[in-house]
Amino acid sequence: MPGDDCFPALFYPLIAQLINSRTLLSKERNNPMESMQQAPDVVHSPEIPTDTEVKYGEREIAEGALITFPNPRVGRRYNVSITLPEFTCKCPFSGYPDFATIHLNYVPDQKVVELKALKLYVNSYRDRYISHEESINQILDDFVAAADPLEITIKGDFNPRGNVHTVVEVTHRK
């Protein structure tokens, strides 16, 4: 019957750890020198895999290109808004990672960009050493080359780093 157990099974490992730590503390009170002779518990950071096999996601990102398909409503002016909240690249000077949310708004002409291809393309920036300004301008250039929209605005809202918040916005119109 629910409620009969004092603790859900989820807490059993935590309770066992607490009991073990209390046992170690009581041993330490009885013989402090014994606990000093034991090796301390060390938590190591996760090991970096040494396999050189390229994962399928890495392969898709590396092969990523902006793919388009025919606009289903040529002649109708409509806006497509896309938010990419996990953009990353590396600072070309320090190598530190930069994080941003990319806001993309465009009015398609003859072609529309396929969303998965856009995601993979944007993910390809994660290991690139590129400035905030250059990354957003390059995304605009590549998007215009692929889809040739009537108009497009791309805004990169970069997370603050070193007390500096950068927003880069670029626009293209036919």
Image: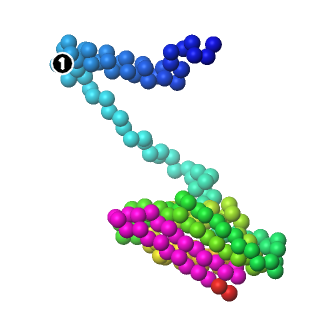
- Residue at image coords 44%, 45%: 48
- Residue at image coords 63%, 58%: 60
- Coordinates of residue 109 in the picture (x, y in percent): 75, 79
- Residue at image coords 56%, 67%: 102
- Coordinates of residue 75 in the picture (x, y in percent): 81, 80
The amino acid sitting under disc 1 is Pro
Q: What is the magenta range?
A: 148-172
Horizontal side, residue 28 vs residue 47: left or right: left
In the current view of this chain or complex, which residue is farthest to the bottom? 174
Quarter of the rendering containing residue 42: top left
Is the residue 36 above or below the residue 158 in the image? above
In the current view of this chain or complex, which residue is farthest to the front? 3
Q: Secondary structure at mark 1?
A: helix
Horizontal side, residue 100 vs residue 161: left or right: right
- Coordinates of residue 131 in the picture (x, y in percent): 44, 72
- The foreground one among 80 and 130 is 80
Q: Quadrant of the N terminus?
A: top right
The verdict on residue 120 being magenta is: no
> Would residue 131 be seen by someone viewing this image from the given angle?
yes
- Coordinates of residue 21 in the picture (x, y in percent): 33, 21
Total numbered badges shown on the rendered structure:
1
The verdict on residue 156 being magenta is: yes
Quarter of the rendering containing residue 145: bottom right
- Residue at image coords 47%, 62%: 99
| Crowding at mark 1 (Cα within 10 Å: few <14, some 14-19, many 20+) | few
Quarter of the rendering containing residue 148: bottom right
> Would residue 127 be seen by someone viewing this image from the given angle?
no
Horizontal side, residue 167 vs residue 146: left or right: left
Residue ID for mark 1: 32
